[in-house]
Amino acid sequence: MSDVVELSSELIRRHSVTPDDAGCQQVLATRLASAGFHCEHLRYGEVDNLWATHGSGAPVLVLLGHTDVVPPGPLDAWSSDPFIPTVRDGVLYGRGAADMKCSVAACTIALERFVDAHPDHPGTVALLVTSDEEGDALDGVKLVADTFRQRGQRIDWCITGEPSSKEKLGDLLRVGRRGTLTGTLRVRGVQGHVAYPHKALNPIHKSLPALTELAARKWDDGYETFPPTSLQISNIHAGTGASNVIPGELSLVFNLRFNPSWTAEKLEQEIEGILGRHGLDYDLHWHRGGEPFYTPEGHLRATARQVLGGFAGAPPEESTAGGTSDARFIAPLGAQCIEIGPVNASIHKVDEHIALAELEALPGLYQTLVERLLL
């Protein structure tokens, strides 16, 4: 069994359902410390974060990942135990195989090999790993970034190992991500009998014009490689369950995925203006999941394009699509951020997996990126 398969399997065996790290980061720290890295454990609440560095000064290149995984779901739906790494027909199965324990293992091994080959390398290489990426992401990289601000810790380049490839390793280079903003809305009415609507105020009826405007609105035309901003209503509830009762309240949750045409603050102001214009009596709680980030053309992006083209056999697609990642907390530190990782077809699914050939290639891919950027 190769080094990367062995380390990946060791991580998969650990039941690190978010926010529990289950000892994964200690395994990584022990290896990296033996390779000469300075390892710092940053624990906030129930979340573990590992910051391992080698070298000094600029440029500072960070490989970013997470050790937590989503719950496996019904165990009897899996072909094998999700926390027992199993190889079948050239494929490694287990929760976290694609998202993203194998990437973390590959990054670790790539850094070990890099400092072994170049012990006096210029600049600083680092691994940053959290156990709070799949959860609320409140005590993970978000708080680590706050700590870095207080320390004045510089980061020039960040490569996140999130599963980004579509069909084969290296066919996609993620150069940015949309921002995410969630609103929890409560509209107040007056409960009453449906036969006497003049003695009540139906919050559903009152809200419909505003909700229609929000749902139908064209927010922008996109931004460079970003798609247009989108608002989606994800949950809505009103009523007592009885057909003859006008409800006294409507509750609704919506989310916006937005490009750099907007900030969360501007969107909040815009939406509150719409709700106010329609005369709603409401409470609205906002959760800012992260601002959009974008890495323009430069040394990081050009180097990644060249390296990925060599691995995939063709230039990668350069994309800002998809959800969010912890890079949204690193980019505001002034870092340029890209995302490169394995095929994402099985992430969060039953029988999550990664092809062994792809896994075996990952350490070399990350090591080549580090060498091309720093040497």
Image: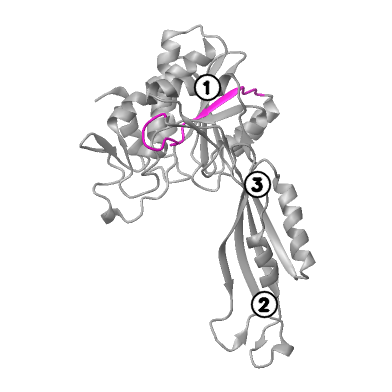
Q: Residue 220, relative to residue 237: is it above or below?
A: above
Q: Nearer the viewer, residue 267 or 261?
A: 261
Quickly name the residue at label 2.
Answer: 205
Q: Which mark is residue 221?
A: 3
Q: Which mark is residue 126?
A: 1
Q: Residue 32, relative to residue 211: is it above or below?
A: above
Which region shows up in magenta? 153-170
Q: Position of residue 173 (x, y in %)?
A: 49, 31
Q: Amino acid at mark 3?
A: Asp
Q: Residue 328, relative to residue 124: is it above or below?
A: below
Q: CA distance from mark 1 to mark 2?
A: 55 Å
Label 3–label 1 contact, CB within 8 A: no
**Residue drawn at (67%, 87%), measured in percent from left and top?**
192
- Whichever of labels 3 and 1 marks the residue nearer the N terminus, that label is 1
Q: Position of residue 365 (x, y in %)?
A: 41, 22
**Numbered disc in front, either 1 or 2:** 2
- Whichever of labels 1 and 2 marks the residue nearer the N terminus, that label is 1
